[in-house]
Image (spheres, helix red, strand yellow):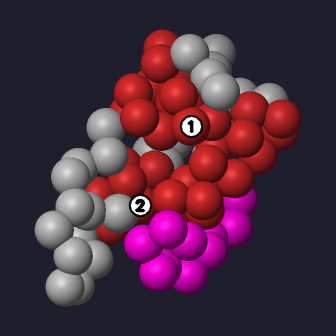
Amino acid sequence: MQVMTKTNLGTLRQELKEVPGKNLKKVAQEDLAREAGLRVTTYRNVEQGRATTYKKANAILEALNRLRKDRGLEPVTLDDLGINIA
């Protein structure tokens, strides 16, 4: 039986839009999946709490932090994402 726990990815994606003084578009799951080099279904599964590999979790982390840096936001860690790594 696979245990699924809620991740913080959706909340962290929303933060990318809410940068004070900037009118930014929402970052969709598709956008972050593309930036991470993953299939959209893989990204969605991870965001919904399904287990993934360290390699895929790290790809999501790096993509998210690139987008955060572009917006002047502090980087996050794997622990901040709350991803279930198998």
Q: Position of residue 5 (x, y in %)?
A: 51, 42
**Quarter in which the C terminus is drawn:** top right
Instruction: Report which quarter residue 24 is drawn in.
Output: bottom left
Residues rendered magenta in the picture:
69-79
Query: Where 17 sits versus 53, above or below?
Result: below
Q: Residue at x 31, y 37 (%)?
A: 28
Quadrant location of the N terminus in the rendered image = top right
* Residue beneath the point at 23% across and 49% down: 26
Q: Is residue 66 visible?
A: yes
Kindly identify the residue that appears in the image at 46 percent across and 50 percent down. Answer: 9
Query: Would you place residue 36 above or below residue 7 in this image?
Result: above
Residue 70 place in picture, x, y as percent:
50, 68
Name the kind of residue labelled 1 in the image. Answer: Glu
Residue closer to the observer: 6 or 53: 53
> For numbered disc 2, what is the local secondary structure?
helix
Q: How many dots with numbers? A: 2
Towards the viewer: 72 or 18: 72
Is 28 on the left or on the right of 31, as rendered? left
Residue 49, can we see it? no
Judging by the rendered image, the residue that carries numbered circle 2 is 12
Residue 51 shown left or right of residue 74 in the figure = right
The 10 Å Cα crowd at callout 2, few under 14, some 14 to 19, many 20 or more, is: some
Question: Which type of secondary structure does the marked residue at label 1 adopt?
Answer: helix
Q: Pinpoint residue 56: horizontal percent, then vertical percent.
A: 74, 33
Tell whether position 73 is magenta. Answer: yes
73 lies above or below 60: below
Q: Main secondary structure of the magenta part?
A: loop
Which residue corresponds to mark 1?
A: 35
Labelled disc at residue 51: none
Q: In the displayed structure, does residue 14 sit left or right of residue 75?
A: left
Q: CA distance from mark 1 to mark 2?
A: 15 Å
